[in-house]
Image (cartoon, grey):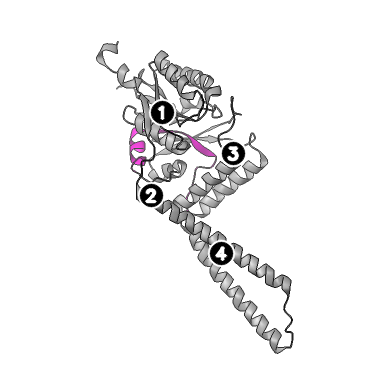
Amino acid sequence: MSLPILTIVVPCYNEEEVFTKSYTQLKMVLEEIIENGDIDRHSQLLFVDDGSADRTWEKISEACVLDSSVSGLKLSRNFGHQKALLAGLEKAVNDSDCIVSIDADLQDDVHVIKEFVNKYAEGYDVVYGVRKKRDTDTFFKRVTALGFYKLMKKFGLSLVYNHADYRLMNKKSLEEMLRFKETNLFLRGIVPLVGFKSTTVYYDRKERAAGETKYPIAKMLAFALDGITSFSVKPIRLITILGFLASLSSLAAGIYVFISIMMGKTQSGWASLMISIWLIGGLLLMSVGLIGEYVGKIYEEVKRRPRYIVEENINNLEKSKTPANIK
């Protein structure tokens, strides 16, 4: 029985400072798994440059020249983490039996990949890397992350708690996932929808090895909103319920005013009037904004524009498989 070919997909965006460390550590892990006889020697690292403005692509290109187990994919501009990851997955699925996705910042423990491969050998189709705790996060990030997972569960989508995009998928499960053709990607929500036999591996997350985070608060909140609106229409239903409750409140207020008039108390309160106007106005604006978010997503989907554009492709895996190079 032939050994499986593993590809480790690493999306990169302005990771010049950490690339060398990332490449070195991932290469070391890949060689260890090959030496243990768990994967084929044609297994590879695939770095995807998501339109970096620094020397990230130059470093990827240099690694491809010096190391036949490294391949590179350069996108024409910055399409975002999820689409860069998708580009790598779509390329890797053609030449691999199992694929691991991991960020380049080395916050995820690279040695856990060995456990991923072991679980794959046991027959699991999907292996999720899950953080044991969030001690390295700020208080705000811990609270908002917990709230996000709980909110998504209430909206009907059971995400794997404390799992980002550090996972292993076999060829079959990845091929099925790639059948989801939406433009607005939230992969950590799509993967559980695919199904198949899955398990989790727990690990401790570290601080960034170098460089700055590519997910400030604004991007995190936008990512969370994308996740919610991509998988549930319940927020729109909540608007309907809110409108119904507001109507009941208006009816109650009308009854109160009528009774006040009948009792001769006709002097109205300026504060209560202003509060009511601002409250209703705020609810209306939020409702219109939320509906607009869904309409905008529909607008993006129906145009069917490409989710990413590849500018350059360095594929060493195909070269290493040619008869002249096989030992």
Instruction: Kindly identify the amino acid type of the residue bearing the numbered disc 1.
Output: Lys
Q: Earlier in the sequence, mark 1 or mark 3?
A: 1
Left or right of 69 on screen, residue 221: right
Q: Secondary structure at mark 3?
A: loop
Q: Secondary structure at mark 4?
A: helix
Q: Earlier in the sequence, mark 1 or mark 4?
A: 1
Residue 320 is drawn in which quadrant? top left
Of the 4 image quadrants, the one containing the N terminus is top left
Q: Earlier in the sequence, mark 4 or mark 3?
A: 3
Calculate the distance from the C-alpha at mark 1 to the C-alpha at mark 3: 24 Å
**Residue depicted at 53% across the width and 23% down the height:** 16
Calculate the distance from the C-alpha at mark 2 to the C-alpha at mark 3: 26 Å
Q: Is residue 123 visible?
A: no
Q: Circle 3: is it few (<14), some (14-19), or many (20+) Cα within 10 Å?
A: few
Residue 216 tag number: 3
Calculate the distance from the C-alpha at mark 4 to the C-alpha at mark 3: 29 Å
Q: Magenta span covers which residues? A: 156-179
**Residue depicted at 56% across the width and 59% down the height:** 286
Quick one: 281 or 245, which is closer to the camera?
281
Instruction: Kindly identify the amino acid type of the residue bearing the numbered disc 2.
Output: Glu
Q: Secondary structure at mark 1?
A: strand
In this view, the mark in front (1 or 3): 1
Left or right of 123 on screen, residue 81: right
Residue 42 position, x and y percent, is 35, 19
Residue reaching furthest to the top = 327
Q: Earlier in the sequence, mark 2 or mark 3?
A: 3
Residue under label 4, please give it: 284
Residue 74 tag number: 1
Residue 135 position, x and y percent, is 64, 35
